[in-house]
């Protein structure tokens, strides 16, 4: 006999209520299980407490003593006085004694896939750009596999000297730096965090000239992308985007038009990429300013008016003190026989350069423009690793009159900003990557301490520790 309608409704309501309760219980159980799993994942991240006599904050210049930094996984969890940060159960303790902790160093302009050996004097004299072009051509035409393996070695050497982040700006073949970056990120090879630019965008005639016409195109396209007009400039950006680059590098000379560079900047910004422009002379610097570049690399002949405009527009200048303080003679003398005339010319050139670079440095400091510093290292330095060669930029900047704290900012907080990575590197603070270095002395009193880094940590992993550790 059929059930009365009211009973049917009552029965259905009861069934629905029971099902709802079961569903709610199941959902609650699921939430509990997921939360428990998340807690388990969080708690399974390794904890490390780093204790040091001092911790320097480059942004403020303040020193915390004694200091403690608690690292969870690859990030900084807590920073404070050593007495306020206890070691959680199971945490590893690294005691660096009286050492000074600093953020990991950032090289904002380097070339990890080049290792140029200074050629003999006669070879340099007979070619345009003779010191650099012969080795660059050898690099372009040799095996890309060989080249990226060299880059892996140089990346490891940079990391061991405390450079936990680098921006590689060209001279890497079609994809040498992007592949090296990916291998480092996947922990297949050791190296710093890396921004890769892929091929450098140039006008025709930059760097190497008078190549065999039958081979010139094939040679150049292994290293560069030509900007012949605005449309080709946009295409060049897109070709680098296809290689998954992190930044666009342009080499500007007097042949580059504002329209071409505007096309590059617009296309790069549309892809959320910054544009770094190699510009030496004032005409090229003005082109970069007018086009809205994000940073001007080198900027040797920048005028005071250009610095003011750059300050107002927020354009960075990336100082590269590579050849300051007699650098070329130091790398050339052990590898080539120099004539007395060449030695005399180098000494005279260094004497002329020093007042210029000192004036250049002081004008930048007084202008209020945002600045970073990069090694521009691509040279073989006999007796030094790549990291040690890169670190020569610190005394070079100091010789030119830059105060130590400004040097530190140029390779930490300021450098993080020029990269657009200020949310992840450049400072020792919670939430940022646990990229740390330590030195025995005080780099504010003696900037050469940065050439003697004793402890390196990248992402919570100890790369090097020459200090007492328990």
Image: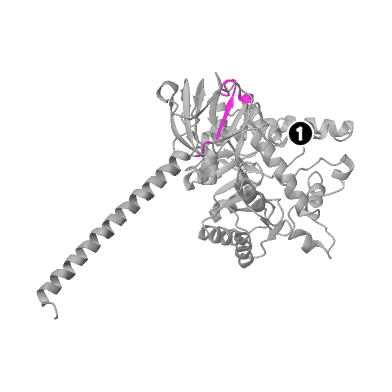
Residue 241 is situated, as x and y percent measured from the top left of the image, at 59, 60
Please tell me which residue lies in front, 451 or 263.
451
Quarter of the picture containing the C terminus is top right
Identify which residue is drawn at 49% across, 35% down.
427
Mark 1 sits on what residue?
Answer: 349
Please tell me which residue lies in front, 146 or 220.
146
The stretch drawn in magenta includes residue 20: no
Residue 174 in view: yes
405 with respect to 184 (left or right):
left
Identify which residue is drawn at 88% across, 30% down.
340
Please tell me which residue lies in front, 409 or 441.
441
The stretch drawn in magenta includes residue 444: yes
* Crowding near the residue tagged with mark 1, few <14, some 14–19, many ≥20 C-alpha atoms within 10 Å: few
Identify which residue is drawn at 18% across, 70% down.
12
Residue 290 is situated, as x and y percent measured from the top left of the image, at 55, 54
Q: Is residue 351 above or below residue 264?
A: above
Q: Residue 108 occupies which quadrant of the picture? A: top right
Residue 195 is situated, as x and y percent measured from the top left of the image, at 60, 48
Residue 251 in view: no
* Extreme residue in the bottom direction: 1
Please tell me which residue lies in front, 114 or 86.
86
Magenta region: which residues?
A: 433-449
């Amino acid at each position: 006999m059929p059930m009365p309608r009211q009973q049917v409704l009552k029965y259905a309501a009861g069934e629905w209520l029971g099902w709802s309760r079961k569903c709610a219980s199941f959902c609650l159980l699921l939430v509990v299980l997921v939360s428990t799993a998340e807690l388990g994942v969080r708690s399974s991240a390794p904890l490390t407490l780093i204790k040091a006599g001092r911790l320097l904050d480059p942004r403020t210049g303040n020193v915390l003593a004694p200091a403690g930094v608690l690292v969870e996984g690859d990030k900084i969890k807590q920073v404070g006085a050593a007495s306020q940060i206890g070691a959680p159960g199971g945490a590893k303790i690294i005691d660096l004694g009286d050492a000074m902790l600093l953020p990991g160093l950032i090289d904002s302009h380097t070339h990890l896939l080049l290792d140029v050996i200074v050629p003999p004097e006669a070879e340099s004299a007979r070619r345009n750009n003779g010191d650099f072009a012969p080795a660059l051509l050898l690099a372009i035409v040799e095996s890309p596999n060989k080249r990226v393996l060299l880059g892996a070695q140089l990346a490891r050497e940079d990391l061991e000297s405390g450079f936990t982040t680098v921006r590689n700006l060209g001279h890497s073949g079609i994809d040498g730096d992007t592949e090296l970056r990916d291998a480092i990120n996947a922990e297949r090879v050791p190296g710093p965090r890396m921004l890769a630019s892929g091929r450098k965008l140039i006008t025709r005639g930059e760097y190497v000239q008078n190549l065999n016409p039958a081979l010139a195109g094939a040679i150049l396209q292994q290293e560069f992308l030509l900007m012949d007009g605005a449309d080709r400039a946009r295409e060049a950006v897109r070709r680098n985007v296809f290689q998954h680059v992190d930044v666009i590098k342009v080499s500007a000379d007097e042949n580059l038009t504002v329209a071409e560079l505007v096309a590059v900047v617009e296309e790069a910004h549309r892809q959320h990429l910054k544009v770094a422009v190699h510009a030496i002379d004032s005409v090229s610097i003005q082109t970069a300013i007018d086009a809205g570049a994000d940073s001007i690399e080198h900027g040797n002949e920048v005028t005071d008016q250009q610095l003011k405009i750059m300050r107002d527009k927020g354009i960075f200048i990336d100082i590269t003190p590579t050849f300051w303080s007699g650098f070329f003679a130091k790398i050339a003398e052990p590898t080539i026989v120099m004539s007395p005339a060449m030695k005399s010319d180098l000494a005279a050139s260094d004497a002329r350069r020093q007042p210029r670079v000192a004036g250049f440095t002081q004008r930048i400091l007084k202008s209020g423009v945002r600045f970073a510093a990069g090694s521009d290292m691509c040279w073989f330095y006999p007796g030094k690793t790549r990291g040690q060669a890169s670190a020569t930029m610190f005394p070079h900047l100091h010789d030119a009159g830059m105060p130590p704290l400004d040097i530190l900012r140029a390779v930490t907080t300021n450098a993080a900003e020029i990269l657009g990575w200020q949310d992840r590197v450049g400072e020792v603070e919670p939430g940022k990557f646990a990229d740390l270095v330590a030195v025995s002395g005080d780099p504010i009193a003696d900037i050469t301490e940065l050439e003697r880094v004793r402890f390196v940590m990248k992402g919570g992993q100890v790369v090097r520790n020459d200090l007492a550790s328990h």
